[in-house]
Image (tube, rainbow, N blue to C red):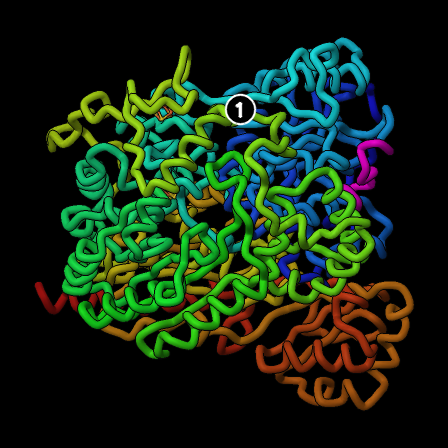
Amino acid sequence: MAKTMERINPLQAFGPALCSVQNPSSYIGGEIGATVKPHGEDDGLLNVAIAFPDVYSIGMSNQAIKIIYNGLNARNSVRCERVFAVESDFESLLRQKNLPLYTLETGMPLHCVDLVGFSIGYELGITGVLNVLDLGRIPLLKSERTDGDPIVIAGGVGATNPAVFSAFFDAVFIGEAEGGLFDLIERLAAMKKNGAARRDLLAECVRHPSVWTQDMSVARCGHTVARRAVQADFGSVPSVESFFPLPNIKTVQDHGVVEIMRGCPNGCRFCHAGIYYRPQRVKSRDLIFAETDRLVNEAGYREISLTSLSSADYPDIGGLLDELNRRYRAQNVSFQLPSLKANSVTLPILAKLSEVRKSGLTFAVETPDEAWQLRLNKEVYAQHLVDIITEAKRRGWNKAKFYFMVGLPFPETDGKTEESVIVDFLRDVQEKTGIRCNVNVGTFIPKPHTPYQWVRQISPEESERKLTYIREHLPRGKFKVSTHDVATSYLEGLLSRGDERAGMVIYRAYQKGCRLDAWEDHLRRNLPLWEAAFAEAGYDVKAEILRPRDHDEPLPWDSVSLGPAKHFYEKEWQRHLAETLTPKCTPGCDHRCGICGNNVSCKNSDAVHKSGHLDDTLPLNVQKNIRQTCNIPVLYRVVFSFTKRDGGEYIAHLSLIEQFNRAILKSELPVVYTAGFNPLPRLEFASTLPLGVTSCDEIASLLLYEPVSEQAFIDALNRHFMPGIRISRSFVFPVTNLRRRESLASGLWGSIWRYQFFGAENSAVRDFFAGDGARPFLQDASSCAFSGCGLRDDKLAGTTDERTLTARLAFRQERPFREALESFFGKKWYEFAAIAKIQTLAKPDAVSFFALYERIAAINAELIRQRDERNT
Ligand code: SF4
Ligand code: SF4
């Protein structure tokens, strides 16, 4: 099964054309913490691409991707690399260059890997899946794949009705990767080493008890139902590392994540995730502390999210927050509980959350009507909410977010509708508390593997009527209402409970141009294409999406078991009708759903997981405290030069600042921070480089509260940057309050640039200098000097190369000169030249920044000497 593969280096393959796409750093890899396993001559490793069906900025926040990536790369026999769906501009660039989509670590063309694994967190990601396969040159339909193609598998919470995706995936892994996927992949790696062919590997895959494939039989698979894999020891053994690699750009959730618990004890009857992640398994505090230490000290995060389906159900969550706040307060690390069940938020928890930085106050209410809450098996007491919000307001929160759903299977009457009870409830809470309310309302989609899997889905028209009522009856100013797009919910209904026919609808929609439909704006734009695909389906798609299912009809997902048997869902449905609550999960519960058994059990004991670390005498494995500007007697300033190349040129300035902030925190250098609630290093840049322009002399500075040696400074930071960003020189000197500290930008004179022209523009640049466009620059000799491309200025050493122009430009002329060239050639600079900054120059006479700051250091030293002399 050895494959020859020409790997793609995106920096060489696209060159400056990367500037033509949004977020170019999404496509170049090279992130800190990425695992790059060098390719040896026929090294026999199993090459796996872990794929996410949405773009980099979303996929890099996905925990499952990082867990699988790090879990597989921990196996010596496996090389796991990442690939994400791309935006349309990059898709055009790939097609224009006739290149396949590739993995980020070593540029493996996707069609050359052995196995592509998609993590499907949300059903609507499917057009992203097809886009990745298509651009990766892998046949979309599994029936068209042959021995030379990769095996394409999927998994995740959005793939529990795999029948819909059966045309595309060779196999689907049901459940948690730690519960069996890693071992399976390792077995496949061993088989590859022994020369197994694709069909042998696939045969091994489908024999796994948690793997679903379209035509399961005992003879072929050994089972006819794929049973969900569960990591039984979650919480009592260290979790797979999930914070590396660190993204190149700001992602949708740009903070550290500790998964403190898996599963949720609450059993809300509409909740698919609640079933998928059963049983509740609590992570020990010691493991939480160890993971937090690494996130703060190794990854450089100062905001940590304590995630789970319902974090307030973590035993003694208040004690955990106390300990975390104590350990990390000095480093200004804040902790968020992103998912709080409304009734679980207590006043003490609120107090602890308000100790550092304020995170959002969010309540998932679903419906405020108490009888309907009994049907949902979810109680939210209105008075409790009012009490909590009143106290939160007193503590400084000024807004709260509420989630509701419409379309739940409730017996509405003329006087009591879902929308009217939501409006009445919100107006009442707002009146009593005075809080500003952000209200989010979605349409309920019946999900497979829940007690509501049989109910009808309301039509888009009914949904729109309900949502409009809510929007119109909550006054702006006090309420900000956002509603889910009804078309999105409608399509999600097709994918959630559809059968194999839905796969062909998706296929046609993709062929018609649908892409990234998990984004509401994309889906709205693509709606006519979806409608056209529905029209060609050969069955009434709309009726199929909306219809209720008979309780005894076979369901498309019957060949998957998440644990509970069908009679459990049926029993829960009867309890819904009877408005009866089912108690929370507890070890040894008396309402067994079928999940806890031989190896797997609900683990939520408070006693087991208290570690006693509240003892203040225990050493804390944390860095030096950060120091803020106030009360520091002597300050030092370090001015330094760094490179931005080899991919670093595509890191946008704000992301660069973030990388510096993280590197500084990890370096433990004695850096001074700003004052306030969100202290940041006192970091300053002389200028901002346009995206795609390389530089070997960017200038920045930091304030220090202790001197460090110049080399120690360089070494401490360089180990935390990607290879293209390198500090090459630094200069440390004391500063004094006897004179005003000048900003770097105020000392900026300009820069020396090198323009390397491509092809025809190479000779045409002479015409530019002969024409009117160049006159303002040629006549401004004090600000501009040029060498190369037929010009020679003695102020510039070196370049007489015909293809290369060296330009020394004062800052005010840099941009006009680039724009004059763009206007002359009629295109953007990156289409005719590569630009590099050679040196940043300082005032007054275009010297190096180090020369300027050596002068300033001498002045400071003299002032300090005079003051000391006066004082003695
Ligand atoms: S609290 Fe309810 S809705 Fe939330 S995760 Fe648990 S079961 Fe699901
Ligand atoms: S068996 Fe009981 S405790 Fe275990 S997951 Fe099911 S309901 Fe919860």
Point 60% across, 22% down: residue: 226
x and y percent of residue 86 in the render? 69, 52
Crowd around label 1: few <14 · some 14–19 · many ≥20 (10 Å): many
Report which residue position mark 1 lands on.
228
Task: Give the extent of the magenta segment.
Answer: 133-144
Point 74% across, 82% down: residue: 820
Q: Is residue 26 above or below residue 690?
A: above
Which residue occupies the foreground of this view, 869 or 54? 54
Q: Is residue 852 above or below residue 163?
A: below
Image quadrant of ligand 2?
top left
Q: Quadrant of residue 542?
A: bottom right
SS label for mark 1: loop
x and y percent of residue 659 in the render? 47, 51
x and y percent of residue 808 in the render? 66, 73
Point 82% across, 41% down: residue: 137
The amino acid type, in three-letter code, at marker 1 is Arg
Q: Is residue 412 above or below residue 558?
A: below
Point 12% across, 69% down: residue: 870
